[in-house]
Amino acid sequence: MTPWQDWSSYRRFQKLPPRDRNIVFYSETHQDWHHLQPLIDFLVGPLARTVCHVTSEPSVPLPPGPPGLHGFRVRAGVMCTWLFQTLKADVMVLTMLDLGNFHLKRSLHPVHYVYVFHSMGSTHMVDHENSYDHYDTLLCAGPHHVEEIRRREQMTGLPAKHLVPRGYPRLERLVEIAAARPPKASGPTTVLLAPTWGDRSTLHVCGEPLIAALLGAGIHVILRPHYQTARLTPRLVEGLVARFGGDPRFRHVDRMEESDSLFDSDLLISDWSAMAIEYALGLLKPVLFVDVPPRVRNPRYGELGLEPMEMRIRRELGAILPLDRVAEAPRYVEALRRDAPGFRERSVAFREHWAFNFGRSVEVGAREIARIADERAGLGVAGRVR
């Protein structure tokens, strides 16, 4: 995309009548689309609303647009910063963290900002302590999100946000797809190695000996690195593929949006990735957590007095592999497989507690966005609901 195309897209957006800018979605990259697209589809479909989708994805084609959907592409950088600062809309919906903390600010005009959680993980350890402070409404996945946000508001004197008990559609989609697929064929144990990213993640700390131990025990390994790992440290991934790619029991997946690896595996090996919650509660399969240091962006997370979900799940959704026992990973894997029936029963109970509106979350979220948009339009001004 050229600067001219940026400007052309921006001008097209600005020329829309106000009624067509009632609801605006923004996505940084195509990785956000599977969280936002279900809401967009429900709004323009059953609710017959007009919606704008602005994305900074540089190359992947936008999803096909049904009637009622306006699509725009504005690159990250100066033009996107200007778009945010001058936005005239009633509601903006986004999955982007840290609104107002860096270069993308709230508009000079009154706009109501709705945050869509793209993870079931907690808000106060992996994210910055003020990552959610500048939104008006949060579509919460589960009760832990509500408790954490309210606790921070109480401790800091922040105005109360509008917290919607919405749920997590990606979890529902996993359950739906899993129910439609035939059961995994019997055969050798297959693990999905999908850790988080960063220089203290599993692939950096012990990826090579871990994979070697698993393959050496006859366990099949699907390596699915986080897209940030592939982007920031491509040589690490290339080295692992070069070392193990010739083994027929090893498979490398380089697309995070693919789903076959989830269903082809018997269990997940991860560390602090919130994907573990989706895997365990959506597919009812156990997780082996490699005990690398946690990812902490908020060193003061303990002040809230709430255990982060990323820590709690390590006790309840599988087992923890100490770093000094990486060579014993196959033994941990087989122990988890033997406990699979009991794990399924426990996971169903956890899912009912940790996720709001299971089976209805898309509709709940879309109807609330529409209600807020109607309220702001009816007032003749968009603004913060307090």
Image (cartoon, helix red, strand yellow):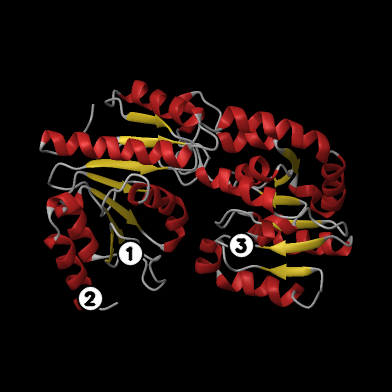
Asked if labels 3 and 2 touch by Cβ distance under 8 angstroms, the answer is no
**Residue mark closest to the camera, 2 vs 3:** 2
Could you tell me which secondary element the residue under label 2 belongs to?
A: helix
Q: Earlier in the sequence, mark 3 or mark 1?
A: 1
Q: Is residue 4 above or below residue 182?
A: below
Could you tell me which secondary element the residue under label 1 belongs to?
A: loop
Is residue 320 shown left or right of residue 149?
right
Local crowd size for mark 1, using a 10 Å CA cut-off: few (<14), some (14–19), many (≥20)? some
Query: Residue drawn 81% across and 73% down?
Result: 248
User: Where is mark 2, residue-wise?
Assistant: 5
Residue 236's image quarter? Answer: bottom right
User: Where is mark 1, residue-wise?
Assistant: 56
Cα gap from disc 3 to disc 1, whole angstroms: 23 Å
User: Where is mark 3, residue-wise?
Assistant: 225
> Is residue 315 at all visible to an observer of this figure?
no
Where the N terminus falls, by quadrant? bottom left
Residue 111, horizontal then vertical, whole percent: 19, 43
Q: Is residue 234 above or below residue 68?
A: below
Is residue 279 shown left or right of residue 123?
right
Q: Earlier in the sequence, mark 2 or mark 1?
A: 2
Name the one closer to the observer, 306 or 150. 150
Q: Amino acid at mark 2?
A: Gln
